[in-house]
Image (cartoon, rainbow, N blue to C red):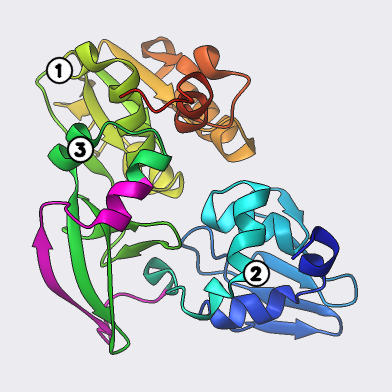
Amino acid sequence: MNCNTAKQIRIIDLLEKLGYSPKRIASESWWYISPFRQEKTPSFKVDLAKNLYYDFGEGTGGTTLDFVMRYNNCDLKSALSILDNNVFSFVQPTVFNIPPQSEKNYEIIAVTEIVNPHLIQYIKSRKLCLKTVKKYCKQVHYTLNNKSYYAIGFKNDANGYELRNKYVKMCLGSKAVSYICNNSKKVILLESWSDFISFLTLYPNAEYQFDYIILNSVTTLNSTLLSESNTYLYKFDKIKYELIVCLFDNDKAGDLATEKALDTYGNNVVDGRLFYQEYKDVNDYLLTINPDNSV
């Protein structure tokens, strides 16, 4: 499949296969709950006439290919492969956009050490240290809408699992941050578990020098961390960390999250994105400097 053919695939058809239906239709403008984060008010618009989307929450948009690359966090070649193989026909919907758990439509069957060769190959394709991934993640077997799946699972503080494999990026259960405490006076904030593992792959000696808060979505920054009532960054009404390092994505959402952290915690915060300023995120930087997968 070439780019022109891919762009002819209707975005609304992909959204339907992912489990999303329009919340409001105004002529050629169809409004959806964003598939990229948890929200109550639809901010994701599809222009049917032009077959383009725009996410007002992120300030980004584009074609069918742009959507597939954003949703799957992949490059153009991978997006074409996903569409060519009709992978979207069996990609699971992102559960965290479904009201949890009024009607529980999933069941965790087993949580084991990561041994599946397809998952291991995915880990290697992201240039992540397999030993480190196995330390912090599990292989999760589950059913969703009466179908069986498996994925890499990273547990959050609400006992939900952030799931990832080659085709799926979703949360099973409640959305929350993941807090890793090493009793340090320094903490690193990251958007995803893959960024966390990427950082440890790049700097293994730093593992126990910091505490880590993995947001699992920049939206949890507002709901969890930007309040003096949170226990992650505050203790007895005082900031408990001497240093708060933000390693968010180099995009508008990452910029906004960093600015909010700086506004809230002031001089305690450092924007640590300087070392990967030419790259999308920590994993993108790792992929570039470690092309031979020597981890």
Residue 65 got which mark? none
The residue to which callout 3 is attached is 179
Residue in view at x 89 percent, y 70 percent: 50
Three-letter code, disc 2: Asp
The quadrant holding residue 112 is bottom left
Q: Return the disc, 3 or 2, that comes first in the chain's sequence.
A: 2
- Real-space CA distance between mark 1 and mark 3, rounded to the nearest whole angstrom: 13 Å
Q: Are marks 3 and 2 in contact (CB under 8 Å)?
A: no
Mark 1 or 3: the one toward you: 1
Three-letter code, disc 3: Tyr
Residue in view at x 43 percent, y 68 percent: 94
Is any part of residue 233 visible from this angle?
A: no
Q: Return the disc, 2 or 1, that comes first in the chain's sequence.
A: 2
The quadrant holding residue 245 is top left
Residue in view at x 24 percent, y 28 percent: 212
For disc 1, the neighbor class at 10 Å (few under 14, some 14 to 19, many from 20) is some
Three-letter code, disc 1: Tyr
Judge by depth and name the residue closer to the eye, 70 or 272: 70
Q: Tell me which segment is drawn in magenta.
A: 98-122
Q: How many marks?
A: 3
